[in-house]
Structure formats: C-alpha cells, structure tokens
Image: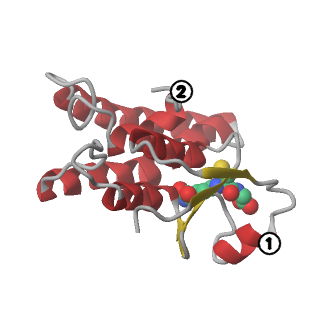
Amino acid sequence: MAGEEVKLLGFWASPYVLRTRIALKIKAISYEYVEENLREKSELLLQSNPIYKKVPVLLHGDRTICESPVIVEYIDAIWNTPNSPPILPLDPYDRAVAKFWGVFIEDKLHPAMRGAARGLTEAVRATNVEELHSVLQILETVLAKCGEEKRFFGGENLGYVDIVLGVGFGLDESH
Ligand SMILES: N[C@@H](CCC(=O)N[C@@H](CS)C(=O)NCC(=O)O)C(=O)O
C-alpha cells in the first residue's frame, strides 16, 4: 500500500492543506499536488469529498482520505518505516494526549480566533477576545510544560500537535 500513487487536492492558502503537506514532507513521500479552484471545484474534488466538498483530499491508490487531522494520522500510519520519523507518539497514552490537544485546537482555539476577529459589535468582540485569551492561556501552560526539555510538543521532532497548531501561526513546509 505504501508504494501506491499519492495525489493531494489542495489550495495554496489553506492551512488545512499545509498540515497534510508538512506530514508528507516529514515522511519524504513523493506525490502529485493538484491545485483546486474553490470557486469552481473539480469533478474529482466533488466526487472524492461529496460530504464536505473541501480540500485537502488525499488520494492514495484507490483510497480517498478527507479531513486534515485524519489525513495526517493516515500518513503517519501508512508510512511508518523505522527510517521515517513518527508524527504521532508511539505510546498509546501519549498519542491520546496529542489527539486531545488536536481536538482542543480545532474545537476551542479556531472558533475563538474567528470570534475575536469577526465579532459584529465592540462588546461582542471584547467578550470574544477574552475567550481567546483564556484558550491561549490554557495552551501556553500546556506547551510550556511540554517544552521544558524539548523543542516541540511531542519531543525533539515536529509532531502532530505542532502541525495542527502551527499552520495557523506561520509554520510552513520548510520547517
Ligand atoms: N475540517 C477541514 C477543513 C477544510 C477546509 O475548511 N478547507 C477549505 C479551504 S481552507 C475549503 O476547502 N473550503 C471550500 C468550501 O468551503 O467550499 C479539514 O481539517 O480538512
């Protein structure tokens, strides 16, 4: 399976697509990148992701994988040779912790960031900024604790939480 053709449907400005490109880069996977026009989505995108009709979509042989955290996890699981650095921790509990913070980033941080930027009135924005502060406080505490002796959330190498979180804060493929 690992040797099958890999294709990624993406959009240049999408942080979600960037997550998957970073994962593919970590694993040194050759793949074909197909840039989508999100105003005029291709038949391939509509057929591959009929539920959400969004990028990224990973096509691996005859398999289709959607949703960036799921794709990152899939890439990690399929290309798991001893020479390729793991993206998720190998220990089941550490994996669960990393995935928990991934969900927190999706469910709490991203809506709080959107709310702080887009609140309709001054008062709503002020409440949203407060909410964002408290979410960031939680993340900062966790990251400071994890980072005490390590460079990244999960250790010395860029891992799952770094990828899920970092694309919103300037992490790109060159990292
Ligand atoms: N939860 C999805 C979000 C993907 C997403 O929102 N993709 C945007 C590009 S940044 C998209 O395809 N938008 C097209 C649309 O909403 O029609 C993931 O993590 O992959």
Tag 2: Cα neighbours inside 10 Å, few (<14), some, or many (≥20)? few
Q: Kindly identify the residue that appears in the image at 30 percent across and 44 percent down.
A: 84
Q: Quadrant of the C terminus?
A: top left
Assess whether mark 2 and mark 1 are in contact (beta carbons under 8 angstroms): no
Residue 90 located left or right of residue 38: left
Say what amino acid the circle numbered 1 marks: Glu
The number of discs equals: 2
Which residue is rendered at x = 21% and y = 57% of the image? 96
Q: Which mark is residue 27?
A: none
User: Residue 87: x percent and y percent?
Assistant: 31, 46
Counting residues from the start of the chain, the first of labels 1 and 2 encountered is 1
What percent of the width, then of the height, locates residue 145?
A: 17, 29
Percent coordinates x, y for residue 86 in the rendering: 27, 46
Q: CA distance from mark 1 to mark 2?
A: 31 Å
Q: Answer with the quarter of the image where residue 3 lies.
A: bottom left
Along the line of sight, which residue is nearer the eye, 142 or 162? 162
Residue at label 2? 170
Work out which quarter of the rendered image holds the N terminus and state it: bottom left
Q: Secondary structure at mark 1?
A: helix
Residue designated by label 1: 43
Locate ligand 1 by image quadrant: bottom right
Residue 89 falls left or right of residue 9: left
Query: In the rendered structure, which amino acid carries the disc numbered 2?
Result: Gly
Rendered image quadrant of residue 125:
top right
Could you tell me which residue is drawn at 80 percent across and 72 percent down?
43
Q: Is residue 107 above or below residue 25?
A: below
Its colouring scheme is secondary structure
Which residue is at the far front?
Answer: 3
